[in-house]
Amino acid sequence: MKNTHKNGNNCDSDGAVRGRLLETAAESFAEKGFDGTSVRDITAGAGCNVASVNYYFGGKENLYTDVWRHHLLLLRDSQLASIEKVMSESQGPPHLEDLLRSFAETFVGSLVDKGRSNRLLKLMMREMLDNRLPADMFANEVVKPTLGAMEKALLRTCPGLDGAQVALIVFSIVGQLIHAVRVRTMFGENARAELLGFDLSETVEHIVKFSAAGIRAYAGEKTK
């Protein structure tokens, strides 16, 4: 079906128009927040009629949710793939550091994607200050699948680990990574960051080693 009545361009498919609306809305929500973004801003940037937001998404609120769902599913899928990659490539029990490093690097990479100007991180910061997502959306679509995969991986890597501890372990790692990315965002890659001795890749490696030691302590293993 070709969309000829909503965007005024009979060469655009519904999927192309919807994609432009999602892309434009994501950028605007990240830069200006939900309240600072108008439907007119979004449709003008996407080259669509004002009515197209209601036509494709049922309103600005649903569009915001769909923007988030798109980003969250990309994040979830990349995290699950990073876990699966480490587990499938290991002949025996994988090294704990390899698992944590793959998880950490994938997570950080999704937040510092220069091509999208740290969009996901900006969206996260705005959502923390002004929560608008359905209460269970993040938990059901990202947290539970990721925790399930990490629990299996960590228990295979550290058999002595109590599965009940996995959630706190993952939340601790994610919290450290988000803080590291925020520091990097605050100072950028400039002289001030160098003076502070801050390097994101080195910080990620520190988080990996620090977390691995804590996990082994939880598991009752001798720290290596």
Image: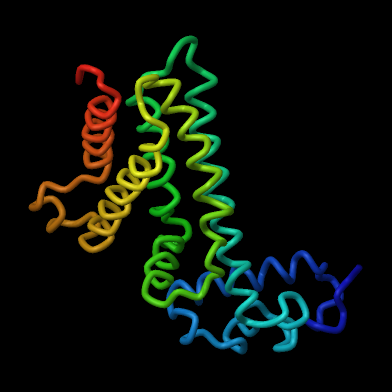
**Quadrant of the frame with the C terminus:** top left
State the residue lying farthest toward the left.
195
The picture places residue 33, in percent across and down from the top left corner, at: 45, 79
The part of the image, by quadrant, that contains residue 201 is top left
Tell me the residue at 24%/31% (across/down).
Answer: 209
Judged left or right of residue 20, residue 151 is left
Tell me the residue at 56%/88% (across/down).
Answer: 38
Tell me the residue at 51%/42% (across/down).
Answer: 146
Judged left or right of residue 12, residue 62 is left
Above or below, 79 against 51 in this view is above
Judged left or right of residue 108, residue 222 is left
The picture places residue 122, in percent across and down from the top left corner, at: 40, 67
The picture places residue 174, in percent across and down from the top left corner, at: 35, 48
Q: Of residues 219 and 186, which is closer to you in this image?
A: 219
Q: Of residues 13 and 211, which is closer to you in this image?
A: 211
Above or below, 198 against 116 in this view is above
Tell me the residue at 52%/58% (across/down).
Answer: 138
The part of the image, by quadrant, that contains residue 19 is bottom right
Above or below, 72 against 84 in this view is below
The part of the image, by quadrant, that contains residue 84 is top right
